Amino acid sequence: MVSGAMGAAPRRPVAVPFGRNYVPTWAFDHIKYYNGGSQIELHLDKYTGTGFQSKGSYLFGHFSMDIKLVPGDSAGTVTAFYLSSQNSEHDEIDFEFLGNRSGQPYILQTNVFTGGQGNREQRIYLWFDPAKTFHRYSVLWNMYQIVFFVDDVPIRVFKNSKDLGVRFPFNQPMKMYSSLWNADDWATRGGLEKTDWSKAPFVAAYRGFHIDGCEASVEAKFCATQGRRWWDQKEFQDLDGLQYRRLQWVRQRFTIYNYCTDRSRFPTMPPECRRDRDA
C-alpha cells in the first residue's frame, strides 16, 4: 500500500543557543555550557541527574534536538526528550534512549500518551552508534498526525484516529523537556543490569535547540493561527510513498517491540494500529 499523498519533509531546523528556548529545571550545576550555549552537556552522577524544559508551551509544531548520547557503559541510564502537558489527563510524546552495557546497542523507546493513557510503546535499535556523534531527533505534531524522525527518517507515525474512538493530543499545550537520569530499576534488561557508578559521570551532549511551534498559554484550547502554519498544509497531513518505505525499512529491520503486535497485552489490536500501518 503506497500513500497517494504529496508528503514532504519538515522544514530544516534552525540551530539556536540553549537559552533562546530552554531553561534548566533541576540540578543546575550538572549542566555544562559551551560556545555561548550553542552546545550543552547533561551530567549524571550517583547523587543526581539533571534536566531542562522549554520556556513556552505549544499546541502543534516541529521540535528538534541534536543529541550525542552517553558513550561506553551506559546501562541503567535514560536520556529522555519529550513533549508533555501539565495535568492529570496529560498528553505526552516521548523519545527515551535506554542505555546498555558496553558493546550492546542503545534501545530507542517511543510512546504516545493521550488523556493520561499511554501503553503505546515501540522499541527499535538504531542503525548507527548514537554515542559516537550527534544525530537529530525530532517530532512533527499537527492536527492530522504525530511523526517521530531520526535524522530525516520517519521511525513512527501516530495518526489522528478520533473517529475510531482514540484520543489525540489537540487541545492541551505541551512543554518540551529533556533529562538524563538513573532508571536502573527498569531501563536495561528490565532492571537486571544496574548502573556502574565507577563509570560516572555519564554525559549526554546537546545542540540545535530548535522549536517552531504555535506558542500558547497553558490554559489555551486551540492555536490562534490554526490552519495557517506550514505544518498544517496538505503535504504534512500524511507521509508520502518514500517516507512510508523508509518507515517500513525501520519496522522490518530494527523494531524489537511494538505494542500493536503484542497479543498478550492487547488480545484485540488497538484501533489506531491499522491506520498507523503497524498491523
Image: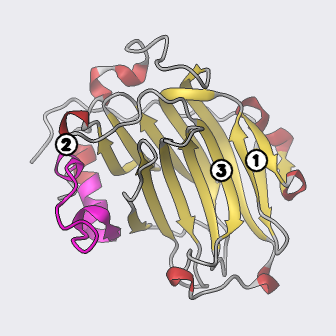
Q: Nearer the viewer, mark 1 or mark 3?
A: 3
Drawn side of residue 215 relative to residue 233, left or right: right
Q: Alpha carbon of mark 3 to alpha carbon of mark 2: how far?
A: 32 Å
Dot 3 corresponds to which residue? 178
Quadrant of residue 267 within the rendered picture: bottom left
User: Whole-Å distance between the Cαs marked 1 and 3?
Assistant: 14 Å
- Please give the label number shown on residue 39: 1
Q: Is residue 232 left or right of residue 269?
A: right
Q: Which mark is residue 187?
A: none
Judged from the image, the secondary structure of the residue bearing numbered disc 3 is strand
The answer to whether 262 appears left or right of 140 in the picture is: left
At x 65% / y 85%, what residue is drawn?
A: 194
Mark 1 surroundings: few (<14), some (14-19) or many (≥20) residues within 10 A: some
Q: Which residues are magenta?
A: 247-276
226 versus 144 height, above or below: above
Front-lying residue, 170 or 255? 170
Q: CA distance from mark 1 to mark 2?
A: 35 Å
**Regarding mark 2 in the picture, which secondary structure is present there?**
helix
Type of amino acid at the residue the image marks with label 3? Ser
Read off the residue under disc 2: 241
> At which x and y percent is residue 160?
28, 36
Label 2, residues with CA under 10 Å away: few <14, some 14-19, many ≥20: some
Mark 3: give few (<14), some (14-19) or many (20+) Cα within 10 Å: many
